Image (tube, rainbow, N blue to C red):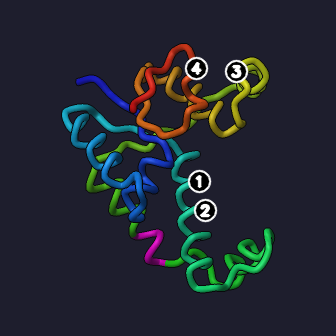
Amino acid sequence: MSSVFIDTNVFYNILFKTNLTRTARKLLEEFEDKKFYTSLTVVNELLYIATRKYYQAKGEIRGSYSLRRIIAVKGYPELIIEGVRRLLEDLEVEVLVEDVEYKEMMNIVAHLKLLPSDAVIALTCKHYSIDTILTFDEDFKRVPWLKVVP
């Protein structure tokens, strides 16, 4: 069975109704016969972004550092934690541990002009021989060993 990596923004558009939700769902349906993978970096990003959206909707975020203060006091909303956990379980996504060398990550950041977390994701895919990534992030198109869908 071949495998695909699912990026943060696909999960986000499944969890929250956006103009890309329909496309994200179609992507998952199109690849439902594949084994789904993601990484700790993606789960980290998803929890952070979803929590930010949650507290913004409640009007509790004031500045760029207020989310850190809110999390320190209130923690991550159980709704968000359970939503992410349930989504990963329902899709039978295996969360990969990153095995990325510092120097290689820095090299990819410099040469492919990727954000550090995107470089870690790309290198994780390479390490696990995953050649397809489901993402709306155009930056991954600069990664020669990845096929970007859509």
Q: CA distance from mark 1 to mark 4?
A: 20 Å
* Left-right relation of 103 to 71: right
Q: Mark 2 — residue? A: 48
| Mark 3, residue position | 112
Q: Which residue is mark 1?
A: 45
- Look at the numbered discs 3 and 4 and tell me whether their residues touch, using CB distance below 8 Å: yes
How far apart, in angstroms, are the residues tagged by discs 1 and 2? 5 Å
> Residue 115 location, x and y as percent?
71, 36
Which residue is rendered at x = 54% and y = 29% of the image? Answer: 124
- Choose the circle earlier in sequence order: 1 or 3: 1
Magenta segment boundaries in residue numbering: 78-82
| Residue drawn at x 41%, y 56% as measured from the top left | 19
Main secondary structure type of the part rendered in magenta: helix
Above or below, comparing residue 47 to residue 27 in the picture: below
Q: Earlier in the sequence, mark 3 or mark 4?
A: 3
Q: CA distance from mark 1 to mark 3?
A: 21 Å
Dot 1 or dot 4, earlier in sequence: 1
SS label for mark 3: helix
- The alpha-carbon separation of the residues under discs 2 and 4 comes to 25 Å
79 within the magenta span: yes
Earlier in the chain: of badge 2 and badge 4, it is: 2
Using residue 13 as the reference point, say whether residue 44 is left or right of it: right
What amino acid type should be assigned to the residue bearing mark 3?
A: Leu
The answer to whether 45 is drawn above or below residue 99 in the figure is below
Disc 2 marks a residue whose amino acid type is Tyr
- The amino acid type, in three-letter code, at marker 1 is Glu
Q: Residue furthest left?
A: 33
Q: x, y percentage for residue 133? A: 43, 31
x and y, in percent, of residue 6 in the image? 42, 40
Residue 86 on the magenta span: no
Indicate the quadrant where residue 130 lies. top left
From the image, tell me which residue sits under label 4: 143
